[in-house]
Amino acid sequence: MAPAADRGHAVLTDIQEGAMAESYTGEAYCVKCKEKREFTGEVKVSDSGRRMAKGTCPVCGTTVNRILGKA
C-alpha cells in the first residue's frame, strides 16, 4: 500500500453563498485506459453513505471514481 502522502488529498473550497465543496486530487483507475491516472474532482456522498471522488480522466475523458470512505 502507498504511503498516505502518495494517496491524494481532499481540500475544501469556497463556492457561492458561503457553501463549501470538497475537491480531491489524487489517483484513480481508468477502466477505459486500464491504468491509474492523476485527476482532480469533486467529493460526493453516495446513497450508501460513502464519500467518493468523481472526476474525468485527463487522457481519454472517461469519468473516474475513487471511494474515499465513510462520510
Image: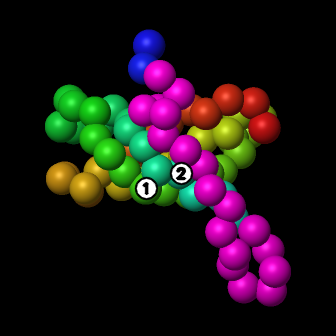
Q: Using the rendered view, name the quadrant where residue 11 is placed.
A: bottom right
Q: Give me the residue at 68% from left, 61% from top.
A: 12
Q: Which residue is mark 2?
A: 24
In the depicted structure, whether residue 7 falls above or below residue 11? above
Secondary structure state at the residue bearing disc 1? strand
Tell me the kind of residue under disc 1: Thr
Q: Is residue 12 left or right of residue 5?
A: right
Within-10-Å neighbours for mark 1: few <14, some 14–19, many 20+:
many
Mark 1 in CB contact with mark 2 (< 8 angstroms): yes
Question: Can see residue 48?
Answer: no
Mark closest to the chain's N terminus, 1 or 2: 2
Q: Which residue is mark 1?
A: 40
Label count reads 2
Q: Is residue 9 magenta?
A: yes
Q: Nearer the viewer, residue 54 or 48?
A: 54
Instruction: Indicate how the structure is coloured in the image.
Output: rainbow
Q: Position of residue 32 (x, y in %)?
A: 21, 38
Tell me the kind of residue under disc 2: Tyr
Q: Is residue 2 left or right of residue 61?
A: right
Q: Give me the residue at 81% from left, 80% from top.
A: 18
Q: Is residue 50 magenta?
A: no
Q: Give me the residue at 42% from left, 32% from top.
A: 6
